Each structure stands twice: as structure tokens, then as C-alpha cells.
Image: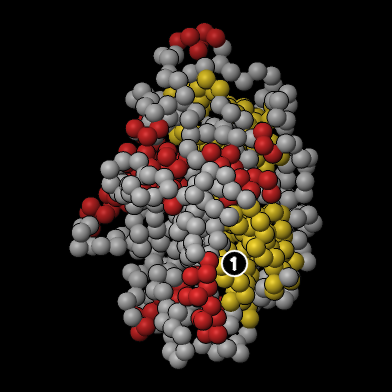
Amino acid sequence: MTEAGSPDRRRFLTAGAAMLGGVASAQLWLPAAARAAEAPLPEGVFSLGVASGDPLPDGIVLWTRLAPDPLNGGGMPDRAVPVEWQLAQDERFRKVVRKGTAMARPEYGHSVHVDVRGLSPDRRYWYRFRAGGQLSPTGRTRTAPRRDSFGGSLRVALASCQNWQHGWFTPYADMLDQDPDVVLFVGDYIYESAPSATTVRRHEGTGEPYTLVQYRNRYAQYRSDPDLAAMHAHAPFVVTFDDHEVDNDFAGEIPQDPDKQGHDAFVDRLTAAYQAYYEHMPVRATAVPNGPHIQMYRRLEFGRLARLNVLDTRQFRSDQATSQAGAQDPSMTMLGAEQKRWLLDGLHGSPARWNLIASQIMMAETDVRIGEGKLWYYDAWDGYQVERNGLLREFAHVRNPVVLSGDRHLTMISDLKKDFADPDSEVVGAEFVGTSISSNGDQDQDAFHAEWDPRKADNPHWKVIDAHRGYHLFDIHRDGIDARVRVVDTVTRPEATPSTLARLRVEAGRPGVHVV
């Protein structure tokens, strides 16, 4: 996106959300008589801040959740509460362009999702909320460029895997300074693990979350991280989930440990987890869960510059293979037939210069066996070889495909090959597996390289591998993508020193990625 002014980035901390409204004139708030009729609310209803997401050329989703007692179910009265909202062209709200009132309902945890439309493309806006006489902090957001626009640029931050217990979310402080147009979060927003007394920070509760209230409490704890809250209030997020938002390594309606979690019990857990996910994410009403199902794969356009295909690699996958033969079974699917058709149609019919695929898990091969033979991680695309290889063959006929992934808690940047079994196979794309925000904590870098460097010869498509915490930053232009691996020196303290670990370049029309 092209720049539309550069206000002080540090001003935008946390904020709130609401519902679609009409054109504003002057004041937003309800008349005094209407406010007086309301029962008073507890103090601190905007404790979870504000967020925005899924930008369109004419629209944006604004979010908040009223929660004066966030770690104990929220603390709100069991009734619907009106939440007023404003969206303005300036941070002082002198030029309000949209306003309205949304109802924060108890059945959705008093969350509010406002799908504001009728906005100008490629423009910054400021927003805020009010409930029970309490005013939220101000958030900042941005719309996407016009669908037919060819020029400009887009700055995207890629993040994933933020384990509260493994450290502070310090990479977001640097991300805020880098001022991305949009943040792409590809999974593991929370971790469902039980509290531990030996970690950097302790999870709330007494065990893993299973019920809706327990998942709400876990999300509320994560939302209290100051750097994450500030980043949400600064730029729109595009989100999808992986496994830890529910249960480690689950597949469809199959838990990691089916001998301990029966099918009906796990369906109840999925239902609770997906509802809590929706309640805490800035997504549209299309993502309102239907029991143990949620619509998460979707497509966003950033002019003719970039098309972003956001995948769901959890709900429709076959259960993980347990052997090499199982990983090569042609019946194994990661996407399911409908989502796979949707993805291929969107890639082949794309008018965009860059076709981005947000995949929760790594698509390039990871051969962990040193020397002859291969050994794969079955939870990644390596466990679904036939479907993955078919997609890579299709990539050869797609304009500038780039996969953006997470899950590994490592930076793993690779060329995507048409056939990983053939070292001389054609390069058909590039993949950036972003490292974690905090998961795995401060790793021993020498030990990491002693373990992984001997595997480079068996994975010649790897361009960069590293185990620092951080995120990836992309400046997307028509002629190429300039990428930076941004890392921090520690996540064991609430402040850290950032740096650029590596710079890379993807040239338009030349598949693959090159270290600068």
C-alpha cells in the first residue's frame, strides 16, 4: 500500500470494535437520557483492547470484547450491551466518516465485530469505542488498494507461534516500529498447554482448556501482552489457526490422543475452541462457527499487486501418517477436495502480480535423515506427499507463487521444487517459514546449527535456516519482493534488541528466493 501520512506509531496502543453503521455527521455517543437508562458496567470493560482485520478496498473489520475481569470469564453482566463506535480520517476524530452502535452479546462473550463498508481504498483510518460511559483507546487501521490498481507497494509482516510460557512477545515491539500495512498471522495464537511453574510466564488456570470459558480465559491472557496489544491497535491482522488453538496435532475431528479424548468430547472441545477463536479475532461474520466447524479459508486482494489465499490446513486434513508409505498414500489430503479446488481456481484465475499462499505448516521438503534415504515430519506437507507434489506441479503454471508459513519455530526459507525427489527439478516458487514470536524461547544457536547444518546437503533447496525468535517482513513491489528476517536477542525479558538476520529477494518472473 502506498503511504498516506506517517503519524507517530507509538501513539496507537489498544482499542475496541463494533458493527456496520452509516455516515456520521458530528457527535457519536448516545443521548444523555439513553445513557442514564443503562445499568452501570464494571470498570475496565476495554481491558482486551481493540483490533482490526481482513482489509478490503472499501471495508475493514473492527473488533473488541468487553471484559472487565478477563481471566475469570470476562466479568460482564448476562445481558446484551450497546457499544458505540466511530471511524475517522484523523486521530483526533474531527473527520468522522462512519459511526454506529453494536450489541455486545453474552452468547459471544460480549465480543463485537464491526464490518464497516463504504470506505475509501488504500487509506488510513482511526477508530474507537464507548460502552457504559467508558471510552476505549484509539486504534489505527488501513483499507486495501482498489482492485484495479497496478502500482504502489505492500508491506506485510509474517508472524506465528506465540507461546505465553516460553517468553514475552517482544518481536511485536520491533514490528510496530517497522509499520507494516498488514500483519499475517498463520497459527498458534494461543497454546493449550497446562500451566508450568518453570517457564518464563505461567499460563492461567489449572490445566488445559476444554470449555468455552477456559478458552476465553486463555485468549484473554494472551491479549494482555502489551506488545501484542499495541500491534493489534496499529495495523489490520489477517489470521488463521493451526493446532494449538485447539489441541496439539489434531486433524479434523481427530485429537492427538483419541484414547484419552473420545469423539463426542473432542467435538465439544472443538466447538468451544472455535467459538473462542472467533470471539477474539477481527474476522467477518462468515467465520461465525457452526458447532465444531468454522469457515477460515478465504481470499484477500491488494489491487493487482498481490492476491492472498489464506488456507485452513487443520479442519479438512486426513489424520497424520505414521510411516513413509502412509505419507505417500494418494488418498491423504491436507486441504480436502473443495478447498483444493478453491485454491487452484484462485491461483490459475488470478489477475495479481504475486500469488501469496498463507499455509500454517511448511510446504517445502524437510529431510531429517542425514545421507541415503528420507525421513519426514508427517504433521507438515511432507506427510501429504501426493497432494503437495500435485500443487507444486500446478505452481509451474501460476504467476509468482510465494508460500508464507509458520509452525516450525524456526526460520526456514526455501526454493519450492517441482519434484523434491529430483535434485535437478525445476524451481516453481519460494517459501518463507517464519520463526516463532516466542515458542521454544531463547534457543542455543550453536546447538541448533550443530544439529541442523549437517542436514543442509540433503536439503539443497534451503536458503536460510535459523532458530532466533522474531518475524519476517516483506516489501512487495511489482518487480520483486524484498524480505527481511527480523529477530530479537531475547524473549525472556519484556524488552529486547532487534536486528536483521538476513535479507532476501524474490524477483518477479524468476521462481525461487535469493539471499542478498
Does any portion of residue 196 appear in the rendered image? Answer: yes
Q: Is residue 206 above or below residue 76?
A: below
Residue 431 to residue 262: above or below: below
Relative to 335, say whether 275 is above or below: above
Q: Is residue 216 above or below residue 129?
A: below
Image quadrant where residue 385 sits: bottom left
Give residue 13's position: percent from left, percent from top: 60, 35
Which residue does the image show at 58% across and 28% down from the upper left? 137
Residue at left offset 45%, top offset 43%: 222
Q: Nearer the viewer, residue 265 or 219?
A: 219
| Res 357 seen here | no
Q: Residues within 10 Å of mark 1 (few under 14, many from 20)?
A: many
Which residue position holds label 1?
432
Horizontal and vertical percent position of residue 208: 30, 49
Please name whichever residue, 90 or 346, is drawn nearer the observer in this view of the structure: 90
- Dot 1 lies on which element? strand
Q: Residue at x 67, y 25 (%)?
A: 24
Question: How many numbered tags mark residues here?
Answer: 1
The residue closer to the viewer here, 502 or 270, is: 502
Q: Position of residue 471 (x, y in %)?
A: 59, 57
Q: Amino acid at mark 1?
A: Phe
The reply, left or right, for residue 464 in relation to residue 124 is left
Q: Position of residue 472 (x, y in %)?
A: 62, 59
Which colour style is shown? Answer: secondary structure
Give the residue drawn at x 74%, y 36%.
Answer: 7
